[in-house]
Amino acid sequence: MKGFWDEVARQGADANPYRAGFLQFVGVSETDEQAERDYAAAADYFYNRCLHVATGFADAPGYRTMRTVKAGIMAQIGAAARQIRQGLTWKDFVEQGYIVAGSPASVRQQLENVARDLNVGHMMLLLHFGNMSKELVTKNTTLFAREVMPHLKGLFGEWEDRHWISPLPEADRREPDVPSLRPEDAAGARR
């Protein structure tokens, strides 16, 4: 994110944290120890068995310079990154920021640190990763919604979020052009 914020400053724009978004895996449980029991296998499964992206498909063509691609993407998903991730323990995943996990209080503190350190107002959180069961995803999502999210809502309250979508003014909207859904029209379309 440093490169992004350096460019924002170079362009003379403000450092509004809502200009940026960041994706983060999150695992919330009753305690830090329970979070390890709940999410360690899923994190290991994702990072060591699922994250296989061919280098040529890691970024959209023209989106970044070749130098940027080599420096950033290779470090995240290339062969060197796979080598680094091999053998990582749960403690490594959490300490190195691959996943934010623990009790609700731990997760709140970690997410606030990530948001402030990176100056990111739009956190995109993955509450389902790896091979988590439906029940575990439901637990994670429920704990996050009830015990973490409400505490983070005002994190950058001093900034206006000018970078989020908003509906068109009523006068600029138009009705969608929807084809007829009558059974006789559908039958004719199948022929």
Image: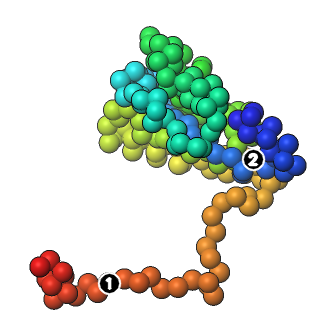
Label 1, on which residue? 179
Number of other residues with Cα within 10 Å of mark 1, as a class: few under 14, some 14 to 19, many 20 or more: few
- Identity of the residue drawn at 80% across and 37% down: 6
User: Cα distance, mark 2 to mark 1?
Assistant: 42 Å
Q: Nearer the viewer, residue 152 or 172?
A: 172
- Identity of the residue drawn at 72% across and 51% down: 18
- Residue 110 image point, x, y percent: 64, 31
Foreground label between 2 and 1: 1
Question: From the viewer's perspective, is residue 186 above or below residue 81?
Answer: below
- Identity of the residue drawn at 33% across and 41% down: 135
Q: Nearer the viewer, residue 159 or 82?
A: 82
Number of other residues with Cα within 10 Å of mark 2, as a class: few under 14, some 14 to 19, many 20 or more: many
Quadrant of the rendered image containing residue 138: top left
Which label belongs to residue 153? none
- For mark 2, give the secondary structure: helix
Report whether 97 appears left or right of 128.
Answer: right
Q: Are marks 2 and 1 in contact (CB under 8 Å)?
A: no
- Residue 86 image point, x, y percent: 44, 13
Q: Nearer the viewer, residue 119 or 58?
A: 58
* Residue most extreme to the top: 87
Report whether 101 appears left or right of 1.
Answer: left
**Residue type at tag 1:** Pro
